[in-house]
């Protein structure tokens, strides 16, 4: 069974631009969660989608948004990029919503904002 | 609000040594506790999940314990190998419907 895939793996953008990241969960998984990882803050929760509905949202500004499609694939968008948005963005999928069962993580998208 | 702490931030041991990694959490009403491994520049790999009703879980050379009353979990690695070198993270949700709250990890180096 294929694991969680994320595209692209690397991105370089400049301040003020916007970016869209994609996550394809493990087949059959309906929950997708997004996390931001930085050296200073560690892993911070962005949002969770289950059955195309946002179920939880972390403490991030409205520039960060996401959605989930009927095939459970998810995208997150960051508008008006800031230098501080440089990070590794990880998505995780699971069978059930929330943190009920094991979370399977993708390899991440490394975003650099110049 | 749940807070998860992992001390030490880094640990270096010689190959073959048994070792323990520590994880503390502030809210004992956790739903489960999960341990992950992260190799440099990579995503997280799930190692063990302990339900709140369990005291420990084992997988190969790994054993994780959970003591909710003291707000602690430990990950025991037996007979460490250089391939065990990675950052180990623990995470706990407050309920089944809330996201994982992660510690900042312990970076382990196993020296051959």
Image: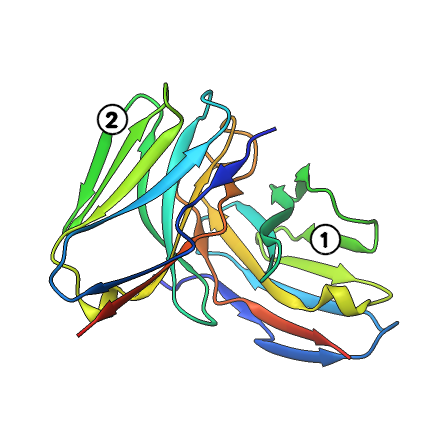
- Residue B55's label in the rendered image is 2
Instruction: From the top left corner, tell me how far across and down residue B104 is, in percent.
Output: 50, 51
Q: Secondary structure at mark 2?
A: loop
Determine whether, in the image, residue A87 is placed left or right of residue B67: right
Q: Is residue B23 above or below residue A40?
A: above
Coloration of the structure image: rainbow
Foreground residue among B14 and A30: B14
Asked if residue A97 shows in the view, the reply is no
Residue matched to label 1: A66
| Gap between marks 1 and 2 measured at Cα | 37 Å
On the same chain, marks 1 and 2? The answer is no
Residue at 52% from the left image edge and 45% from the top image edge: A30
Looking at the rendering, which quadrant does residue B71 occupy? top left
Residue at 37% from the left image edge and 23% from the top image edge: B70
Give me the chain letter of mark 2: B
Q: Quadrant of the N terminus of chain A?
A: bottom left
Determine whether, in the image, residue B28 is placed left or right of residue A35: left
Looking at the rendering, which quadrant does residue A16 occupy? bottom right
Q: Secondary structure at mark 1?
A: strand
Residue at 60% from the left image edge and 52% from the top image edge: A34
Instruction: From the top left corner, tell me how far across and down residue A22 is, in percent.
Output: 63, 65
Badge 1: how crowded within 10 Å, few (<14), some, or many (20+)?
many
């Amino acid at each position: 069974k294929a694991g969680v895939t994320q595209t692209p793996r690397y991105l370089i953008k400049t301040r003020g631009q916007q970016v869209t990241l994609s996550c394809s969960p493990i087949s059959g998984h309906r929950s997708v969660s997004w996390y931001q990882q930085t050296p200073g803050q560690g892993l911070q929760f962005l949002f969770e989608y289950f059955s195309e509905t946002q179920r939880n949202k972390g403490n991030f500004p409205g520039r960060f948004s996401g959605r989930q499609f009927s095939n459970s694939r998810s995208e997150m968008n960051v508008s008006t990029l800031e230098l501080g948005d440089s990070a590794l963005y990880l998505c995780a999928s699971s069978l059930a919503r929330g943190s009920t069962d094991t979370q399977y993580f993708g390899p991440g998208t490394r975003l650099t904002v110049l | 609000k749940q807070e998860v702490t992992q001390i030490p931030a880094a640990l270096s041991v010689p190959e073959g040594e048994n070792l323990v990694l520590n994880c503390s959490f502030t809210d004992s009403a956790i739903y489960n506790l999960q341990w992950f491994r992260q190799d440099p520049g990579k995503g997280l790999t799930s190692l063990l999940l302990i339900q709140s009703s369990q005291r420990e879980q084992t997988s190969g050379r790994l054993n994780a314990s959970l003591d909710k009353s003291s707000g602690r979990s430990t990950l025991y690695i037996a007979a460490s190998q250089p391939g065990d070198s990675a950052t180990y993270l623990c995470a706990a949700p407050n309920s089944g419907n809330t996201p994982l709250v992660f510690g900042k990890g312990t970076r382990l180096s196993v020296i051959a």
